[in-house]
Image: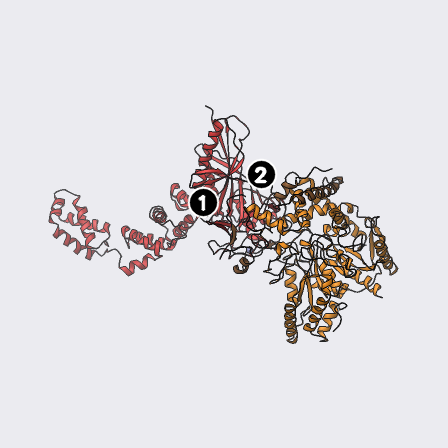
């Protein structure tokens, strides 16, 4: 039985983080009422002309620099002609001949070690509108039409669905770190087309590929790849041939399906966009942008280990999502308790995040409130259990812990006079436990401490109570 | 003489349904025109840079600042068919 | 009130300023004139007296309040492919019969700012594709000098209106001669500015790298006045250049003395109507007599211009006209069975024959396997044509040529043979390919009484120079 090699390449479309569309001043805001962010340009009205959003060009170049691309110092735009109701001009303005960025790559970890997945190029283009399907008709909303979109085209360097996932995960992380996209999958900020082929081991040339279009969840891509590999292997092993075609992933049925496309669907008749003059990026400016680039995820992990003395594991977890790392670093600067803070974040906070389905920027917890909470525990103002009880309110309602402690009188009781009287009361009411202890059953001390805590309604400092009980027994000759 | 033009294919690409008479008429006319324009093959164009624009300039950018959009009612009223908020189309089964 | 037929833009502005007449009186006279003449000429697709007089009354109020905007109260006719907010803009196509412009083209906004009255929508070849205005989906415009003849095209409605006493001045567009050739056929002044001089924003595109808006007027001075209002950098059009707009009118001084006029030999070959050649050469001779130096120049790639033009223009058009798909605006076929049908039927019903022909030609030259052979080569050949002009303008200040090989021809005469029709653009098309400016002005007429135009070409952004030359020539003619 011969082995088969799998080859995967990805074309990933990413929304840039601009305020306005690629070629007009309409807002890119997500979730607005249909057809409220439209103008002559993004509706393709007669006579309307595109004018480039300079910020989008900058963001695309920054993404390219972060991914190690060469920047094309002379870049042009082209028209890609195809008719579809969501494409307002029935051509898309894109870059065919001279894209902004060439080359580059994304490093992924594989069981065989880390490997660089090469990027072929990155070009800048515009998104289409949205078609909504109803029972008896379809509707079109052009709000999204014209949103700046960069397309990152990988080389066919991936050989399994797991590698594809690692690539997408790391790519997304770098783009978020670059600050050029939210990469919000639910909002369709990051969508991929997948090219996939199989071939018997030993065969040089790639097998015939199928393309699966427009998937916006990683889970979907993974499932689609698994399905498609199975499908192609089944055909090839039976001696059949793969048809070069475009397929669609049906998540409900869990299968890819052939899209019935016209024979001429790929005759795009590209030609240079006469309405847009070329972009020239002088070397000095690009170097300035390069010098001001944000840190890459790997560099940040390293730096966090060094700067905060936290374990590599912690740094990895925290830096995985840039907003989390940002949050941690601000809080760290406020409270100085790095390892404790990291523990709080990685256990309690992340637990709340996953329960609520929110991101750190969506919830009401602030670096200041978490830093304050950790400081209160450290200073012994409140104890750990109290702090854990407060956290959900910081998380959900944005309350500040010091104020809550004050208003609710939650400060620990460390006044030894008060504790003394609690202790005496407990010793009188629990003669048996006292006797047990004196008879050598040291565990009884724990019970007595618990009783003192109970009397203080949880506010006593348990360490102090332990100490006082030990001293009292010592005085009793225990 | 130029290759014969597949008028049916090209008109499909251009999304214009031609009648048989039109197809026949265009077949001859387009071949005559294409035959004529092929006179550019008589030029030596090696090492000549293409002219892609009406004038020579670069870097024309817009600031990333939101400007007002059109009134939705007016926009949808211009459409051949509309709903309250969308452009209306016959149901799309699928033919990209 | 003077006769609209002879009233110039300068005269109208002067009369309004001196309160010899009000804008309402002026515009009423215009409306009366259109009512009287347009039954024959059919220059206008749409003219709404109420709308015109309302604008006129407003401008009279503004003037009374001290407003002295540069074109206040003067009616300007608009070619029906320029968007003016709230007006129709059919491009003489069934496709856009019901389309309503929701925004102002930059040139419309500039006219609005200058206080002009929007006087009506002039007829044209559908989507500016044609040289006779016979390709309008709605009506055939006639030549004011001979009603059996075409007015030229594609801005035939604007030319006929200006020359026929139905407009004081008008806007046209010129992609391959569509201002200059009808100006020549009808006997008025028509100017194509350099590419990048006037904004194209809001002007329904035919061929984006060639289109320009320009003035169509009775005199060179009027062209200078109107061009100053239209020209300039536009943040909505990335192909406009940020070059200062001179006061063209103020520079209309001086004569022919010292001027170097180039005669490109490729424009004086057999094949032109002898009456046209004679009239043009006579004009050149009179310039020499007035002190100009005449030099022979060569534009060796002229013979390729038509081929290059019809490849590039139709290719760009095939994309520019894709948006007329019956989804967001314009004509939609009844109950299409699929999205493909929605497009193919709507476009088949909405477009006329010439538009279909050019879209299909443009689609063909871009289609898979043919790009390099046609579009790629044409772009390179365009470079050679541009270089011809750069070299020629090293030897002379302006070029003088005929506008069209023939005077106006009979309606129906040329429309059966597209290639023959295209070849008629040979003297105008190169200026668009080269991006330079050109003006057409009357220089005589045929024995049959049809006007003949003289074309004066200048380098890119040399509008001042050709206006000066044209003005000097016009003064000599008038004298
Ligand atoms: Zn817009």
Q: Image quadrant of residue A153?
A: top right
- Chain colored orange: C
Which residue occupies the foreground of this view, A106 or C418?
C418
- Chain colored red: A
Q: Residue furthest top?
A: A1
**Mark 2 Cα within 10 Å, few/some/many (few <14, many 20+)?**
few
Q: Ligand 1: which quarter?
A: bottom right
* First of labels 2, 1 by sequence position: 2
Residue A408, percent from left and from top: 27, 59
Q: Closer to the camera: disc 2 or disc 1?
A: 2
Image position of A189 (left or right of A455): right
In the rendering, which numbered label is found on residue A300? 1
- Chain colored brown: B
Q: Quadrant of the N terminus of chain A?
A: top left
Where is mark 2, residue-wise? A263
Q: Image quadrant of residue C198?
A: bottom right
Residue C118, percent from left and from top: 66, 65
Image position of C64 (left or right of C272): left
Residue C179, percent from left and from top: 73, 57
Q: Secondary structure at mark 1?
A: helix
Image position of A28 (left or right of C323): left
**Mark 1 Cα within 10 Å, few/some/many (few <14, many 20+)?**
many
Q: Image quadrant of residue B13?
A: top right
Instruction: Tell me whether marks 2 and 1 sit on the same chain.
Output: yes
| Contact flag, marks 2 and 1 (Cβ < 8 Å) | no
């Amino acid at each position: 039985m011969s082995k088969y090699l799998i080859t995967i390449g990805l074309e990933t479309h990413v929304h840039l983080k601009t305020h306005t569309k690629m070629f007009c001043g309409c807002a890119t805001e997500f979730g607005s009422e249909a057809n409220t962010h439209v103008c002559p340009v993004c509706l393709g009205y007669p006579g309307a002309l595109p004018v480039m959003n300079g910020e989008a060009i900058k963001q695309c170049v920054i993404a390219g620099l972060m991914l190690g691309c060469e920047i094309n110092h002379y870049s042009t735009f082209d028209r890609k002609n195809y008719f579809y109701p969501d494409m307002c001009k029935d051509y898309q303005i894109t870059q065919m001949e001279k894209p902004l960025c060439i080359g580059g790559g994304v490093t992924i970890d594989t069981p065989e070690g880390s490997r660089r997945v090469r990027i072929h190029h990155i070009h800048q283009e515009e998104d289409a509108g949205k078609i909504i399907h109803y029972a008896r008709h379809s509707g079109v909303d052009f709000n999204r039409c014209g949103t700046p979109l960069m397309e990152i085209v990988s080389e066919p360097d991936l050989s399994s669905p797991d590698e594809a996932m690692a690539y997408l995960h790391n790519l997304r992380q770098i783009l978020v770190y670059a600050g050029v996209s939210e990469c919000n999958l639910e909002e369709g900020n990051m969508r991929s087309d997948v090219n996939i082929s199989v071939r018997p081991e030993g065969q040089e040339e790639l097998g015939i590929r199928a393309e699966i279009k427009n998937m916006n969840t990683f889970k979907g891509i993974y499932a689609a790849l698994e399905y498609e590999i199975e499908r192609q292997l089944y055909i090839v092993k039976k001696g059949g041939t793969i048809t070069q075609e475009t397929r669609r992933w049906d998540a409900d049925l869990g299968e890819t399906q052939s899209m019935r496309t016209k024979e001429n669907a790929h005759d795009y008749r590209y030609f240079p966009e006469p309405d847009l003059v070329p972009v020239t990026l002088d070397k000095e400016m690009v170097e300035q942008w390069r010098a001001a680039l944000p840190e890459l995820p790997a560099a940040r992990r390293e730096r966090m280990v060094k700067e905060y003395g936290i374990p590599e594991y912690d740094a990895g977890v925290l830096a995985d999502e840039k907003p989390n790392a940002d949050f941690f670093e601000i809080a760290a600067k406020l409270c100085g308790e790095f390892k404790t803070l990291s523990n709080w974040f990685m256990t309690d906070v992340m637990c709340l995040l996953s329960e609520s389905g929110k991101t750190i920027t969506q919830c009401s917890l602030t670096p200041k409130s978490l830093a304050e909470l950790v400081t209160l525990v450290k200073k012994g103002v409140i104890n750990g259990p109290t702090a854990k009880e407060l956290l959900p309110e910081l998380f959900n309602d944005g309350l500040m812990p010091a104020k809550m402690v004050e208003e609710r009188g939650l400060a620990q009781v460390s006044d030894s006079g008060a504790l003394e009287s609690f202790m005496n009361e407990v010793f009188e009411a629990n003669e048996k436990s006292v006797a047990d202890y004196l008879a050598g059953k040291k565990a009884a001390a724990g019970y007595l401490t618990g009783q003192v805590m109970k009397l203080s309604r949880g506010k006593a400092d348990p360490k102090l109570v332990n100490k006082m009980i030990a001293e009292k027994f010592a005085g009793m000759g225990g | 003489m130029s290759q014969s033009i597949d008028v049916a294919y090209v008109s499909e690409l251009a999304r214009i349904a031609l009648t048989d008479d039109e197809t026949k008429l265009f077949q001859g006319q387009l071949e005559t025109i294409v035959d004529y324009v092929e006179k550019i093959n008589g030029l030596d164009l090696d090492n000549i840079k293409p002219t892609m624009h009406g004038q020579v300039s670069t870097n024309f950018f817009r600031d990333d600042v939101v400007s007002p959009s059109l009134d939705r009612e007016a926009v949808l009223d211009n459409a051949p068919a509309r709903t309250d908020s969308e452009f209306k189309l016959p149901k799309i089964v699928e033919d990209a | 009130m003077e006769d609209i037929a002879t009233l110039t833009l300068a005269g109208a502005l002067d009369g309004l300023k001196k309160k010899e007449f009000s804008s309402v009186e002026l515009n009423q006279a215009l409306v009366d004139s259109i009512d009287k003449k347009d039954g024959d000429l059919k220059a206008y697709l749409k003219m709404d007296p109420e709308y015109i007089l309302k604008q006129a009354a407003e401008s009279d109020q503004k003037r009374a309040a001290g407003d002295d905007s540069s074109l206040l109260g003067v009616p300007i006719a608009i070619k029906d492919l320029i968007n003016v907010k709230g007006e129709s803009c059919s491009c003489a196509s069934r496709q856009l019969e019901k389309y309503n412009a929701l925004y102002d083209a930059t040139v419309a906004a500039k006219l609005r700012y200058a206080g002009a009255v929007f006087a009506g929508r002039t007829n044209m070849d559908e989507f500016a594709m044609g040289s006779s205005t016979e390709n309008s989906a709605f009506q055939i415009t006639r030549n004011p000098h001979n009603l059996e003849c075409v007015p030229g095209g594609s801005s035939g409605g604007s030319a006929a209106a200006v020359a026929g006493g139905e407009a004081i001045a008008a806007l046209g567009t010129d992609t391959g001669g569509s201002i200059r050739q009808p100006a020549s056929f009808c006997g008025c002044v028509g100017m194509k500015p350099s590419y990048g001089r006037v904004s194209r924003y809001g002007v329904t595109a035919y061929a984006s790298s060639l289109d320009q808006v320009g003035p169509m007027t009775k005199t060179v001075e009027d062209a200078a006045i109107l061009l100053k209002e239209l020209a300039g950098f536009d943040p909505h059009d990335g192909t406009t250049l940020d070059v200062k707009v001179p006061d063209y009118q103020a520079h209309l001084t001086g004569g022919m003395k010292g001027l170097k006029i180039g005669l490109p030999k490729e424009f004086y070959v057999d094949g032109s109507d002898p009456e046209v050649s004679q009239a043009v050469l006579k004009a050149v001779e009179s310039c020499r007599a007035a002190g100009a130096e005449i030099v022979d120049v060569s534009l060796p790639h002229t013979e390729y211009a038509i081929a290059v033009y019809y490849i590039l223009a139709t290719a760009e058009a095939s994309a520019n006209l894709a948006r007329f798909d019956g989804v967001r605006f314009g004509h939609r076929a009844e109950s299409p069975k699929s999205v493909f049908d929605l497009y193919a039927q709507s476009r088949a019903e909405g477009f006329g024959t010439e538009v279909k022909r050019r879209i299909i030609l443009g689609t063909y030259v871009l289609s898979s396997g043919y790009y390099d052979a046609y579009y790629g080569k044409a772009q390179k050949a365009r470079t050679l044509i541009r270089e011809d002009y750069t070299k020629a303008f090293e030897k002379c200040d302006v070029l003088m040529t005929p506008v069209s090989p023939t005077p106006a021809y009979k309606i129906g005469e040329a429309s059966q043979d597209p290639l023959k029709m295209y070849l008629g653009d040979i003297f105008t098309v190169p200026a668009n390919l080269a991006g330079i400016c050109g003006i057409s002005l009357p220089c005589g007429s045929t024995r049959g009484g049809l006007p003949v135009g003289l074309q004066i070409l200048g380098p890119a952004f040399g509008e001042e120079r050709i206006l000066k030359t044209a003005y000097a020539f016009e003064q000599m003619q008038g004298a």
